[in-house]
Structures are given as C-alpha cells and as structure tokens.
C-alpha cells in the first residue's frame, strides 16, 4: 500500500511530458492531480509502454489512455506548426462496449482537446448510418471512438 501512495505522490501533471495545450485542458477540466490509476499508468504510457489496468468506474481510466494518445498526435511532425497532418486514416481507434461509453469517452477527448481544436475526434455507434459513418471517416479524424460490435456472418453479409 505504501508503494501505491508513493507512486501517486511522485506523479503530477506538471511532471509528465505533456504538450502545454493538454496541461491547460487538464486544468480547465479541474484535474488538479492524477487519479491513482493515472499516476500509475500515465508515466508508462507516455514512454510508449503497453499498459493493462482495471479500476472502478470514475477512477480516471479514460484520461489515463486519452492523454498519451493526444500527446502523440500533438507531437507528430508538422502538427505543431499548424499544418494539416498528411494521414490516410485515424491515429487512434478506441473501442468501447456500449453506446453510452462512446459518448462519455468522446466527451473526455473533447475536453482534453479544448485548447487543441485542430485535433478531431469522431464517435460512431451502431445507430450511426453507413452514410454518416463514411462522411465522418472521410474527414480523417485523428481519433475514432466506436462500439465494438461482434457480427455474425449473416449480419456481415448484410452490411456488405
């Protein structure tokens, strides 16, 4: 238990290699210090390491993976100069199990990109029409948040 408290005390948002726009957004949403899961996961994720964590609802898991994703996007060559990134597709795809979580995760990404308005996020759920999905994806969003849908061969044939 002592190690957990020590790890949290040593990590602050200021001690992480975050873009200034992300630091402003973190302050803007009222995150004064990382939650326990963020304190443990962010330093590793910011180093590019894979992180697997399990924590209760409301523990800050979304911020623990959203911040490193957004940091990488903002670091991409040419982005800081305000130029449009030459991408063929999204930089990150976030899959969640429910439509409600799509909206919650989208809101966290929206909050964290408040001061980086050129970073685009698209949310896609099962009730998003194929035409609307194509339209959203044609804009080449940096992040796509979607519901993971397991399809049977029959429904897959129907969609094609």
Image (tube, helix red, strand yellow):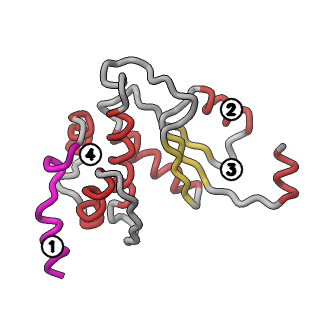
**Membership of 15 in magenta stretch:** yes
User: Which of marks 1 and 3 precedes in the sequence?
Assistant: 1
Judging by the rendered image, the residue that carries numbered circle 4 is: 29
CB-based contact (under 8 Å), mark 3 and mark 2: no
Q: Helix, strand, or loop for circle 4?
A: loop
Q: Residues within 10 Å of mark 3 (few under 14, many from 20)?
A: few
Closer to viewer: mark 4 or mark 2: 2
CB-based contact (under 8 Å), mark 2 and mark 1: no
User: Which of marks 2 and 4 precedes in the sequence?
Assistant: 4
Closer to viewer: mark 4 or mark 1: 1
**Membership of 11 in magenta stretch:** yes
Judging by the rendered image, the residue that carries numbered circle 3 is: 126
Which of the pair 99/121 is nearer the observer? 121
Judging by the rendered image, the residue that carries numbered circle 1 is: 5
Image height of 92 relative to 114, above or below:
below
User: Which of marks 1 and 2 precedes in the sequence?
Assistant: 1
Residue at 85% x, 58% y: name it.
Answer: 153
Judging by the rendered image, the residue that carries numbered circle 2 is: 134
């Amino acid at each position: 238990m002592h190690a957990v408290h020590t790890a949290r005390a040593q990590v602050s948002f200021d001690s992480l290699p975050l873009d200034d726009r992300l630091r402003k957004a973190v302050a803007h949403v009222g995150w004064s210090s990382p939650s326990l899961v963020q304190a443990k996961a962010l330093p590793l994720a910011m180093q590019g390491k894979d992180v697997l964590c399990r924590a209760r609802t409301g523990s800050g898991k979304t911020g623990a993976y959203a911040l490193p994703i957004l940091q990488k996007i903002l670091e991409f060559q040419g982005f800081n100069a305000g130029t449009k990134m030459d991408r063929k597709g999204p930089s990150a795809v976030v899959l969640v199990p429910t439509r409600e979580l799509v909206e919650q995760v989208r809101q966290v990404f929206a909050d964290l990109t408040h001061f980086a308005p050129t970073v685009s996020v698209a949310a896609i759920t099962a009730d998003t029409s194929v035409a609307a999905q194509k339209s959203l994806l044609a804009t080449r969003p940096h992040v796509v948040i979607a519901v993971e849908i397991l399809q049977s061969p029959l429904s897959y044939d129907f969609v094609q």
